[in-house]
Image (cartoon, helix red, strand yellow):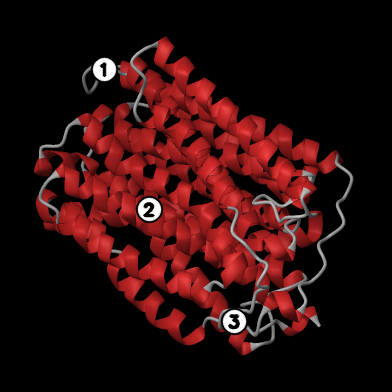
Amino acid sequence: MLPGEDRAARRVLLVCMAAGATTLLDQAVLNIAIPSMRQSLGATGADVQWIVAGYSLAFGLALVPGGSLGDLHGRKRLFIAGVAVFLLAGVTAATGGEPGTLIGARLVQGAAAGLVNSQVIGTIQDVFHGPARGRALGLYAVTGGVATALGPPLGGALVAGLGPEAGWRCCLLLSTPCAVLTLTLAARRLPPPRRTSRNSRLDVLGLGLLCGCTLTLMVPFIRTPDGGGEALLWGTAVGALAAVFAVHQRLRIRRGRQPLVHPALTSSKPYMLGTAVAMAQFGSSLAAFLVLTVFLQSGLGLSALLTAAVTLPGAVGMGISSALAWRLVRRIGPRTVTVGLTLGIGAALTGATVALCVPTEALPMALAGTQLMSGTAGGLTVSPNQTQVLQHAPAEAAGVGGGVLQMAQRIAAAVCLSAVPAVYLHAASGPPGDGQPRTGYALASCVCAGLLALALLLSLRRGTAPPSRPPAPASAHHAGAGPRSKEST
């Protein structure tokens, strides 16, 4: 059941859940169609890398600017504009005839998705308060997670049913009806923009520095540097931009101006540790899934449809565990995340063992079982952790707090999607049927297990941190005229 007793608030939450499902399904559904898309367009490896990773890059770059603009000027117009641009860019990508068109459309679509999702988190924080806010944020996270898990099975079915040429294009069009529905619901049900102070000014320099730092950090993992000298240059640029950004934020605070990143975020140990947990978990899960699809299709020679069947239990497990996670949260509290991460480590290590020991004929079925474990672990981790993190974001920085969290996840995704598949490809250089792809998959799974182990240590460390004082509910001036849950009164 949706949180809150206010019907209008529930309708707002449905719009937010629809937006999350639309934007995250679009990214997940394309992964399994990459081989047919590459063959159809004659795309190079670099082209495919930008088509896939460019979406995440633009998504991450748009999150904090979108959150800041929403905090200052209201969220509804930005939400609607983002969904509209996302829709148009998706149609352009699906009908494109060359790699350059597809790359450009995916970059625009990713930026629009980042703008939308930053408004979603801010809107939920505006409308819901108290326990209802936690449940609402959790449902949003669950919706996105299930959409991400369902994407590959749907993509595999489309490619298998419609053929390679039409299949990958329909994969890109799959989110179109969802976007149309989201746009219609948003125009009717989102709360009107709130009034802001005339003295509220956007920190343009801070935004530029933060976007530059994010771009400089992510690009080397999307386009591998030619050598150590170039890698060192990228790293130096990241450090310099980060230092200048930190100094700029301190100067704004001293001058009595609102910084881009609210001090309550950086000074909150639970927020910072929870964000680090989310980074490790998110990057590990995306990288593990990409390696699995490559292993099944290239290493074992399975079709797209059979690959989708192997991954489907992950979506089922995540959906079921997400629905039950809140019962576990009520009993053991934040330790729910610990349970989920522990199960995720077990799933990754089991997958490595299965790849090395199970005969080829039974391997797809065994890997489907590990996917069920992995999806269950994700359902117990993602939603409770995100809710815990965003509880420490003040009302006046709700959009930025959510944007920083998601931006950190996108950075982790860029790093892990580059590093973990490289481990697999380095070890799995043999032909299908050889033992080398199995070894590569096992090594990559162990790397993902290590990332989850790091997340587990950070989660345990967060449990020992002193509790932070929860942010005060937003006043009418900050919360605007939108609907509010009666549980907050």
| Cα distance between the residues tagged 2 and 3 | 27 Å
> Distance of mark 2 from mark 1, alpha carbons?
38 Å
Judging depth in this view, the residue of 473 and 146 nearest the camera is: 473
For image coordinates 44% across by 27% down, the residue present is 420
The x and y percentages for residue 161 are 15, 57
**Circle 2 is placed at which residue position?**
110
Q: Which amino acid does the dot numbered 3 rest on?
A: Arg
Residue indicated by mark 3: 10
Residue 365 relative to residue 409: left or right: left
Q: Nearer the viewer, mark 2 or mark 3?
A: 2
Residue on which the image places disc 1? 434
Q: Quadrant of residue 228?
A: top left
> The residue tagged with tag 2: helix, strand or loop?
helix
Question: The residue under label 1 is which amino acid type?
Answer: Asp
> Is residue 24 shown left or right of residue 330?
left
The residue positioned 12% from the left and 39% from the top of the image is 39
